[in-house]
Structures are given as C-alpha cells and as structure tokens.
Amino acid sequence: MPLYLNLAKLISVSDDVSRCNTPSNSLAIFKELKSLQVANGIKNLSIVLYSEYEHVFASVSACARAFPTYSRKTNVKNALENIELEIVVTDEKPLADADVNFLQSLADSIRTCGNQVDAPCNELHSEAFLADAQRLIGELRQRGFEITEEVIQGEDLLTKGFGGIYHVGKAARNPPIFARFTYKPKEATESIALVGKGIVYDTGGMQIKTKTGMPSMKRDMGGAAALLGAFCTLVKSGFKQELHCLLCIAENNISPDANKPDDIIVMLSGKTVEINNTDAEGRLVLADGCYYAKNSLAAKTIIDMATLTGAQAYVSGKLMAAFLSNKEDWERAAIKAGKRSGDLVSPLPYCPDLHFPDLKSSLADMKNSNLGKMEGPASAVAGLFIGSHMDFSEEVNWLHFDIASPSESGERATAFGIPLICSLLSDHLDVGVAK
C-alpha cells in the first residue's frame, strides 16, 4: 500500500502458511520488496521490519537478496546508494549483539554472492572468481582469523589426479582451479567440508546447449559462491569447528581439447568414468571435491551444493531446492534449517542400491549420465554419481543440495544457500537468531 507522495509503502504478509512453507513467509517479503519501484533520484532507502524473533533470520535474508548490486547500465542517474534496515522484534526476546553481528555478516555475504553470480563470464572467469574468493578470505585474515589455503590449477590438476575438474575445464582459455580454504579454531573437535560447484560458464560442451538453453549459464557457479558466502559468514560469527570451503572451478567450453562423448577419464577417486553427456559436468567436478574432502581432509560432514540439474525444477519446483542425504537425521535437520532460514528444501530418495545402476557402463566404472530410460529420479541419480566416489560411505554425513532453480529469480541471482547452510550448522555458533 503506497503512502505519502509514493515515498513510503506498507507491506503486510500473511501469517497463514502451509506446512511445507517457512513460517516466516519470507518468500512473500522477498517478492514484495523485489517488485518495489524506487523513485528516480532516491539514493537512500529505509526498511523497518516488524518480526517475531524466530522469523528475523529468514526475513532479513529476504530483504538482503531483494536489492541486487551488480549493474553495468550507463544511463542510470541517482541510483540507490544506501539501504538501512531497522528491525523491530515484536515479542519479548531482544536481539543480542551476536545476533546483530551475524545478521550484518549474513546480509553482506548474500549481496556479495548475488554480485558474483550476476557477473558475466567475461568478467568473472575462473581466475577472477578465485581472486575474488581470495579477496574475501583476505578480509577474514585482516579481522584476525587464521585461514590456510591451497590452490591447484591448470595442468597441475591432472598431475595430482583431479581428473574431473581438469577435463571439464581444459578447453577454456582460463584454467580450471581447485581451491581449499580452511579455518580451524583451537576448540575444534570435528571437521566439516563445504564443496561448491563453480562452473563459471556452461556451454554444455561438445553436446552444446541451445540458443535458448545457454543464456544464464553464467550462474552455474552459484553453488560455489553460496558456500563461499556461508563460509565467510560462519567464520565471522565464531564457528567452533574446523571448516573447509572447497571451490571446484571450471569453464565448460568447446575446443579441440574438450571432453567428447565416449571419452573415458580417471577421477581423483581412481574410478573411471565414460563421458556420454558433456553437459553433465557439474557432478564431475564435485566428485573430485567430495573425494578430497573425505580422503584428504578426513571431514566428518561433507556438504556439496550445485546448480546441478534442470530436472530439479520438476522435483521441488522453482522456489525450493532438492537435496539428497545418506543420513536420516541430517535429512530432517536440512528440512528444519530450510524452514528456519527461508531457503526451503525438499528431499530426494537416497537409494544407491536401486538407482545407481542407472549409470552402469560396459567400458568403465560408470557413465556420467543416463540418456535412456531411468529407474531413479534424474536429480537423485546425478547426486548418487557424486556419492559413488565416496563409496556411499556411512562413515561420513553427506548432503547434496541441487539449487538449480531457486538460485535465480527472474534475471537476478538470489544467493540461495547461504542462509540454509548457516542455519544447518548453527549448533556450532553462539547465535540464537540462527537456531
């Protein structure tokens, strides 16, 4: 409802939501704010959020992602410069300083992630993405956090066995990259790894996408950008466990060196993969990353995130991510975290015994896709490809999030995944608003 001179607007969202929606109804807040037309010449925007304490987390996330920052427009004058968010908690539980600091870090990470995902590949190619990640890690170090890193790129990936990442990115002008960032506080008792798909552009490879299917594929690094943002937010907020952020970065392009259908490659796990779909590249890079997390880092919990399959939209729709987990308690925790954070998720069936045979190859250990009749859901089978390189181990807690559709809204990135992961791992934070 517009108010005086159309310079103020009152937005009210319903408290009545379905059982699978977030109780905060934050998606409605996001849609209302996203549609807000800011008058020409307005440089400062003030938002006053009235919310119950338990809904503040999701509501702030909705506000942060509603105002994207990336733009290359040259004819915009007097663009919006500042957004101030005032939070009025309507119940008797006030926000603590730790809550406020967390929410500020969360909002910063959401907007940074959105900027990265909206940037085109001619600006944010593989090396530029790495440089931006290192910039963010450098800011953490300036705050006094000790972060170690390892970067492997180009031909060194092949030398060290990262066949999935290398072969996906070998055809591009800029090299494929594997980057590890690790934070280990003194009180840490367990290790958690975040593994992100960072395909800075996906042409589909030799089995090239169509003229309508290729636009927006700059966003195929949305999983890596979201996990980088979650990593930064968690570290700034006093995360108590060892936390790794693994970025599997490549550009899936075309050249005489590119993967071809029928090629057989060797993965970091030592398993062989028959390529029958060059457009099923995300699972290849993630398989290397997850194997590394399990076998080189001895991570107890491994969370991967990717804009992995177009089929995800048919499983859980455009507003919810689909996910796969080998542990029932983590499956329940992910659903709860989705409702708490506003990043809604819906589970896929975890049935490697029933569905992994869909990737059977007569020449290699597996194919990277199934182009015929499948017995399993396509998004679940894609996830199982990744799990197979960890031998479907019950010794680790594994969650695979497919965020293909909710990672964008219209022509803009949403930074989906940052609030979700922060909520999922909030037991290791002293931040009440995230729990």
Image: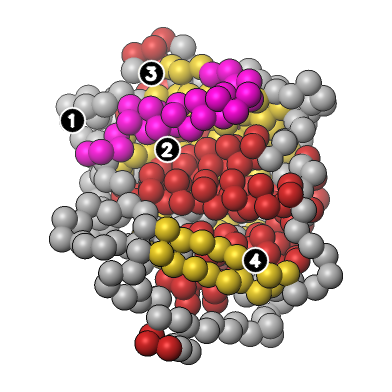
**What's the residue type where badge 1 is placed?**
Ser
Within-10-Å neighbours for mark 4: few <14, some 14–19, many 20+: some
Residue at (45% x, 88% y) in the render: 3
**Residue 423 seen anywhere in this rendered image of the structure:** yes
**What's the residue type where badge 4 is placed?**
Ile
Mark 1 or mark 4, whichever is nearer to me = 4
Residue at (58% x, 71% y) in the render: 48
Disc 1 target residue? 255
Residue at (68% x, 52% y) in the render: 100
Q: Quadrant of residue 143?
A: top right
- Above or below, 155 against 1 in this view is above
Residue at (75% x, 58% y) in the render: 95
- Above or below, 166 against 371 in this view is above
Which numbered disc covers residue 87? 4
Disc 1/disc 4 C-alpha distance (Å): 52 Å
Magenta span of residues: 122-149
Q: Earlier in the sequence, mark 1 or mark 4?
A: 4
User: In what quadrant of the picture does the C terminus appear?
Assistant: bottom right
Which numbered disc covers residue 153? 3
